[in-house]
């Protein structure tokens, strides 16, 4: 036994385990970071939206630069286009959300009556059902509508920082062509060492661009579907389908449920069934058939991690965190992959294909 350990034991003080202490410090650091992100979300959320828009528009900007368009002029053209789109989105959200919020109590009251009547019918005609009243007390059919109203109101509040978002996006786009040179000069890295992050950002930008185009088409189809059926606020349902298409797995369901409930309240069971079938067809065609074919690759994340990331980033940043959960989790995975000590975490949260590739690499090195 070493002298220092013997003295510590004699003195009644045991030398702490280095690994255990490191784990405690790491856990405490993660908690502090999460708390800091939550406290700073008023500033971070506009920055994230600006980065999201910059990743989408960097390809058109580079295309214009290759055709001898000056960087400043290309950035101005892109920013003006984005401003027009955001102005249109803000106008649609502002007027539609105000009208929907005002009509929400009437819709909810009518929905409560329909649900109560259905439960009463089931209790009267099916033997052995004695607890339908208790079930009815637990069901809150207006929850989905209130959730949608809260999400859209939060997004509308975010869009009030339009100028901060736009100016941040301008400076990001202007820095695109010089960032690799600055990183090499500052940290002494070679061009080969930056190949991984460059490929990741290119794939992330491609993913976001394709996802945005598919989301736009999804929103247009959803808006046309609800308009053709005669639902109130078709622009709102189209906008909701566009936004929530960024949310993996459950986004399309969240977008469809309030529209189906409104169709039930406003037009009856037949229109509600038609709305549900229409949304299901749209999501199958674009989400399960067209999107995988166009992208040609997945997001590189485990489906469980995609869902956990949705909850985690939504907890930190609210609705914007839910919309950007996949890009944020992919960026976190890249950061974990860059360090040998945390690469195992990146493999665990990655897809099965990534795990097989890592296993193949280990076998090849051993052989």
Image (cartoon, rainbow, N blue to C red):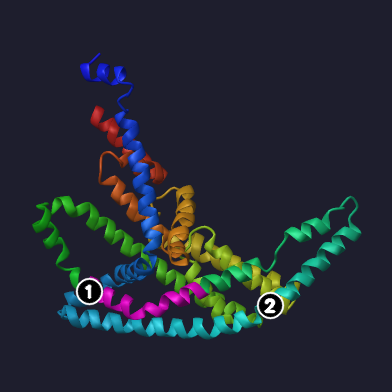
Q: Residue at 70%, 74% (x, y): give it.
A: 108
Residue with the most extreme front position:
11
**Residues tagged 2 and 1 counted as in contact (Cβ below 8 A):** no
The magenta span reads: 153-172
Disc 2 marks which residue?
A: 105
Q: Would residue 271 be found to the left or right of residue 322 on screen?
A: right
Tell me the chief SS of the magenta region. helix
The residue lying toward the viewer, choosing from 168 and 244, is 168
* Residue 218 visible within the image: no
Q: Which label sits in the foreground, 2 or 1? A: 2
Disc 1 marks which residue?
A: 171
The residue lying toward the viewer, choosing from 172 and 229, is 172
The quarter of the picture where residue 157 lies is bottom left
Q: CA distance from mark 2 to mark 1?
A: 44 Å
**Image vertical order of residue 208 relative to residue 359, above or below:** below
| Image quarter in which the C terminus is found | top left
Q: Residue at 89%, 55% (x, y): give it.
A: 126
The quarter of the picture where residue 328 lies is bottom left
Q: Secondary structure at mark 2?
A: helix
Residue 138 got which mark? Answer: none
Expressed as whole percent of the image width and height from the top left, the position of residue 49 reads 36, 70
Expressed as whole percent of the image width and height from the top left, the position of residue 189 reads 12, 52
Q: Would residue 252 be found to the left or right of residue 260 on screen?
A: left
Mark 1, Cα crowd under 10 Å, few <14 / some 14-19 / many 20+, is: some
* Residue 50 visible within the image: yes
| Residue 72 among magenta residues | no
Q: Residue at 32%, 71% (x, y): give it.
A: 50
| Image quarter in which the N terminus is found | top left
Q: Would residue 315 be found to the left or right of residue 223 on screen?
A: left
Q: Residue at 24%, 75% (x, y): give it.
A: 61
């Amino acid at each position: 036994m070493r002298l220092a350990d013997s003295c510590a034991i004699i003195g009644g003080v045991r030398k702490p385990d280095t690994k255990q202490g490191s784990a405690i410090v790491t856990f405490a650091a993660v908690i502090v970071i999460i708390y800091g992100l939550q406290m700073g979300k008023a500033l971070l959320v506009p920055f994230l939206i600006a980065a999201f828009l910059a990743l989408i528009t960097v390809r058109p900007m580079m295309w214009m630069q290759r055709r001898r368009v000056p960087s400043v002029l290309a950035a101005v053209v892109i920013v003006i286009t984005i401003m027009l789109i955001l102005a249109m989105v803000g106008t649609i959200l502002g007027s539609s959300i105000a009208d929907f919020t005002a009509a929400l109590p009437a819709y909810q009251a009518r929905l409560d009556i329909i649900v109560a009547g259905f439960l009463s019918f089931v209790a009267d005609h099916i033997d052995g059902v004695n607890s339908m009243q208790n079930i009815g007390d637990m069901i809150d059919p207006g929850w989905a509508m209130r959730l949608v109203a809260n999400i859209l109101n939060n997004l509308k509040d975010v869009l009030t920082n339009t100028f901060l978002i736009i100016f941040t996006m301008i400076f990001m786009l202007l820095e695109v062509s010089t960032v690799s040179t600055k990183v090499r000069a500052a940290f002494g890295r070679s061009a080969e060492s930056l190949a991984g992050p460059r490929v990741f950002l290119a794939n992330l930008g491609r993913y976001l661009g394709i996802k945005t185009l598919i989301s736009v088409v999804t929103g247009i189809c959803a808006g046309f579907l609800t308009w053709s059926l005669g639902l109130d606020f078709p622009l709102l349902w189209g906008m909701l389908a566009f936004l929530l298409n960024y949310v993996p797995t459950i986004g399309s369901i969240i977008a469809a449920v309030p529209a189906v409930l409104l169709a039930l309240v406003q037009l009856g069971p037949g229109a509600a069934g038609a709305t549900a079938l229409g949304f299901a067809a749209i999501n199958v065609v674009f989400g399960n058939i067209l999107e995988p074919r166009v992208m040609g690759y997945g997001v590189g994340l485990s489906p469980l991690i995609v869902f956990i990331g949705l909850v985690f980033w939504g907890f930190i940043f609210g609705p914007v965190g839910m919309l950007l959960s996949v890009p944020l989790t992919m960026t976190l995975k890249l950061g974990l992959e860059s360090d040998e000590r945390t690469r195992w975490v990146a493999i665990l949260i990655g897809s099965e294909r990534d795990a097989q590739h890592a296993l193949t690499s280990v076998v090849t090195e051993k052989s």
